[in-house]
Amino acid sequence: MFVDWRRGSTRLGFAERNAFLQLWALASVAAAASLSASPAAIADDRQTVTLIDLSEVGGPELEIAHDVARALRLDEKLRYRDPDESLNVGNEDSHVTNIRSGRSFATAGMKLIESKSWKDAADELESAATAYVGNFSHAGDEDRIETIIAMQGVALWRSGDKAGAKRAFTRSVEFRPNVKAELAAYGEDVVKAYNDARDGVMTRGDVTFEVRTSVPNADIWVNGRYFGLSPCFVKSLRGPQYIRASRHGYVRNGRLETVKADGAAVDFEMKPAHRKPAWDALRERLAEVFEGAIEPNDLSVAQGLLNAGVAVIIHISGTREKMQVRLALANLAGRQVIKRSTTSIAWMRRDKLAIEKLVQELFAAPDLPPGSDGPEVRTESVLKKWWFWTLVGGVVAGSVTAAVLLGDTDPPQPTYKNGTGGLVLKF
């Protein structure tokens, strides 16, 4: 092949052009496949991140791991994917299917509310609420179930079913008392009905009970509030209790209980997740990630198992007086560990702000441009710099190059003035 590069002129023979384009087509397909493997990355510009905990099982360690996950959920630039979503595939298919149905019903119901088709909206949102409440332990952070139930109340109220609306408003408050629905856009009478229902729930007396699990140290949530690791005591408003128990490597469990007396106990059976053996093996294979030894293929395994492009890997050890928290940021898709950090903190009581700071520092990417005063460290998030836009840029640039090569039909040799010359490449 002969390429004559003189002020932008490029010459390829017919066979060479075809060979080049075939190679580029293969590269473009591969790039497109890698992008289409994560459709959420196209529809949602947030990076999907998961958590891999390598710690030995213990109360303080799991408390810190819980707060690391909480910090990841709070970061608006990230989409946190709980490992349970992937580890329980196969055990929870019916629940997951019902949650998806709930999302579809909710979307349809909200569109009907926008068009003020109140009765049809009430029917769709009732179906959504039924699907959600029956499978609430498998819902994601994006599923605002209490809001959907409140909107069902709005539709019922506007369609003339005042009694049904009041029941829906009450159930919305019971499901998550610490969240108040914003319904001002639907009229003062709707707001008053909702507030009356809320007051009726919030003025109930308290009830105290214990939640126990067959495997200890499971996260316990009641009515949208986190109460700690099992076994734990819960103080809640009297009435329905929406209780959820979860622990990585086990099937998520949740059910509705009505606790009538103080001192009652609620027991949960925790069954191993479908992919627990693979999860345990992965944790063993990543054990030396903080020592600098990492097998890139193990990160590929993690990506496939947890369905996320990025992971925060943690290892926590020590005593409450001095806990050693080690964090690593891993690009699973790129098969590399980008950053590691080690911090010692006292953990006599939960310190959410300290954990949030550690996570923020982990995601702050150092830029080291040379300068007279030494390297300057910037703290722009690494999420804005990674492979996605580089890959897209490569695809676009290559496509432009391919188009130029295709369109070139052996143009005449340009003439140059003496001394201007050109660069000739032969290979």
Image (cartoon, rainbow, N blue to C red):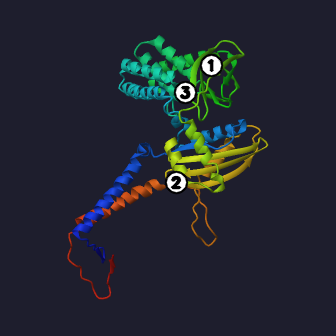
User: Which numbered dot is residue 335?
Assistant: 2
N-terminal of the two: label 2 or label 3?
3
Image coords of residue 188 (percent x, y): 48, 21
Asked if the residue under mark 3 is in contact with the one under mark 1, i.e. CB atoms within 8 Å, the reply is no
Among the 4 quarters of the image, the one containing residue 128: top left
Q: Which of marks 2 and 3 is in front?
A: 2
N-terminal of the two: label 1 or label 3?
3
Task: Specify few, some or many for label 2: CA neighbours under 10 Å numbering under 14, 14-19, or 20 or more.
Answer: many
N-terminal of the two: label 1 or label 2?
1
Residue at 66 percent of width and 12 percent of height: 260
Among the 4 quarters of the image, the one containing residue 207: top right
424 in relation to 397, above or below: below
On the rendered structure, is 402 left or right of 192?
Answer: left
Residue at 48 percent of width and 19 percent of height: 190
- What is the residue that sits farthest to the bottom in this orientation? 418
**Quadrant of the drawing holding the C terminus:** bottom left
User: Which numbered dot is residue 202?
Assistant: 1
Asked if the residue under mark 3 is in contact with the one under mark 2, i.e. CB atoms within 8 Å, the reply is no
Q: How far apart are marks 2 and 3 (CA)?
A: 32 Å
Q: How far apart are marks 1 and 2 (CA)?
A: 50 Å
**Quadrant of the drawing holding the N terminus:** bottom left
Identified by mark 2, the residue type is Arg
Task: Specify few, some or many for label 3: CA neighbours under 10 Å numbering under 14, 14-19, or 20 or more.
Answer: many
Identified by mark 3, the residue type is Ser
Q: Mark 3 points at which residue?
A: 137
